Amino acid sequence: GSGGKGTWGSVMEDGSKRVLIDRNDPNYDSGEEPYHLIGAHVAQSLQVYKEKVVYIVEEYFATGNVADAATDLRDLGSPSYHHYFVKKLISMALDRHDREKEMASVLLSALYADVMEPDQLAKGFTKLLESADDLALDIPDATDVLALFLARAVVDDILPPAFLSKTQAVLPDGSKGLEVLQNAEKSYLNAPLHAEVVERRWGGSTQTTVEEVKRKITDLLKEYVESGDQAEARRCIRELNVPFFHHEVVKKALTLVIEKKSAEAGIVSLLQECADEGLISSNQMSKGFSRVFDALEDLSLDVPQAREILEDLAAKAMSAGWLSSSFVTPAAASAAAAAAAASNDDGAAANGDTAVDDAHVFKQKATGIIQEYFLSDDIAEVVRSLEDLAAPDFNAVFVKKLITLAMDRKNREKEMASVLLSALYAEVIPVGQIGKAFTMLLESAEDTALDIPDAANQLAYFLDRAVVDDILPPLYLEEINEQLPEGSLGKEIVHSAESILAARHAGERILRCWGGGTGRAVLDDAKDKIAKLLEEFESGGDMGEACQCVRDLAMPYFHHEVVKRALVMAMERKSARPLCFLRECSSEGLITTSQMVKGFGRVADYIDDLALDIPDAKSKFQGFVDEAKAQGWLSSAFGGAAQANGSA
């Protein structure tokens, strides 16, 4: 009943045939509530996955066909199990000849980023290290071979060197896993000419090793720079037959330009032609640029102006269309912000053309912020970035861009987008701007569906998630439904969202619709901690300790949840202690004015629901508002329940 797209039926199922049941009827029986069976994709069990993985690995060792293995793994699905594939591939290679060991390393390098996420690959190595003691019982030299696999992964740029130190901190003393890490570092990675030694350790006995491909790429680029024969260069790239490794072509080509400025014109022309004819995909092009940006620190030691050269190349590539316009580096985003600020300082006229330019610049910067967030999962950094942009009129554009980018990505990014919206709500982006963003998304749903086939289904879930997360009031769905034209896809999406919300246990299912990613887990954990600290304080706990617990949360953008829960507790328990706690948090500067207003606002938005359980909730809440204003820890601009409901 949960876990991903397509889980709750199609967007056309609006539930219009449901029989209405009067819950106020004395004979009402909850068992008579309407329900319908929904077809769902059953998640593949780990046991079934394991059996299929063994077959893929055996087939690969027999044929040596990297492309087929990559296709088989992609078709197998279940990307959350990819770490097991890494573990199984290396475990099976440990007890085989050098040929299979080399093949395993080549395959991992080929799968990296395109088929397998970096975090899954790292997790696979972590699992191997944790089971090193068991492996050593069956394979006497397991620790040494594992150390070589680990060193090879670092040399092939699929594991960061920092992986060793980070993993070393979590492995128990005396374990074989710790011995593997130490062996990899001392015997291989710290040795002279370690890269060459590691790459040749197994003799390069596969048909084509990573080392051979890299050497061929280097040779064809050097030959091209000397001869200028572009057709021959493209033929050589095509004959490599490693489309999953074309990012290495881009990386080496860009590095060559940085080191040899005279080669720029020829290299740029070659890359553009490769992109135009589809020889190098957009994804591989972006990945190649990213790898060079990641290596800038080392490149700058030899070529001090490396950053300027690379940023200029990226700008030219995006302008010419052979690098995705969504590729925005942090430095480029900062430059755009500075340019926009300088333009404003020069007193640019506020006419229609300027507004369009401003919106375009904002979209570029917003895209950079969102992409950085999807990589870092740092909500606080997004908050700071939006505050630095100081463009509140474009907040709806940011929300629309966030959801649009997330819809075309994996469940992890969809969950992160929903969590970010919840964190930004009210304090950074007012509910009116969020509502406006969803309105724009629904109005442009037909266009979005041309690029993202499942956009209608995804947008229905995003709408429901915003309602369940208390970001949008349920009334919003009714209001926007009246504004959308009959027969439009946007109207069908709203009907689907209403149908999903009306289902039994809808709240729990919607919260897990993206699989319950790490971002949601963080917020859920924070909510649990807030509830516990308030319970402990209400039971006679120390004020200083309670304040310290709030401080330890390290989530200042989420302090409105503390305010909300404290106010509800004060109503339910008829206790003044939660209010004293809020006053103390305000006087210490622990909870900001905006977070305090946001917390009061959330209670005000749902005061009618609270009144069902607490009959005098409205009068109590108004008393809290008056008391807080009188004592100076709530802004006098806050108008209480009436104003909040009116604005909602």
Image (cartoon, rainbow, N blue to C red):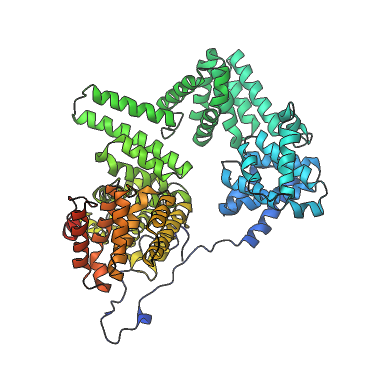
Q: Which residue lies furthest to the bottom in this view?
A: 27
Up the image or down, 319 lies above or below 421; here it is above
Residue 165: name its quadrant. Answer: top right
Left or right, 140 with respect to 360, comes to right
Task: Give the residue at the far right of this rendering.
Answer: 140
- Residue found 18% across the figure and 67% down from its top: 619
**Residue 246 visible in the current orientation:** yes
Q: Is residue 117 among what the camera can see?
A: no
Residue at point 30% right, 45% down? 428
* Residue 67 sits in quarter: top right
Instruction: Give percent across and percent down for residue 341.
Output: 29, 27
Residue 106 x %, y % = 69, 39
Image quadrant where residue 605 sits: bottom left
Which quarter of the figure is the C terminus placed in? Answer: bottom left
Of residue 351 and residue 571, the one placed in the foreground of this image is: 571
List x then y, in percent, for residue 487. Answer: 26, 56
Q: Is residue 623 left or right of residue 174?
A: left
Of residues 139 and 525, the one nearer the viewer is 525
Tell me: 390 left or right of 36.
left
Q: Taking 289 as reference, is 117 above or below it?
A: below
Question: Is 399 above or below relative to 464?
Answer: above
Residue, x 42% and y 32% (percent of image)? Answer: 328
* Number of marks in picture: 0
Q: Looking at this view, is 451 or 525 the one in front?
A: 525
- Rendered residue at 81%/54% (across/down): 138
Q: Name the residue nearer the viewer: 607 or 238.
A: 607
Give x and y (percent) for residue 418: 39, 52
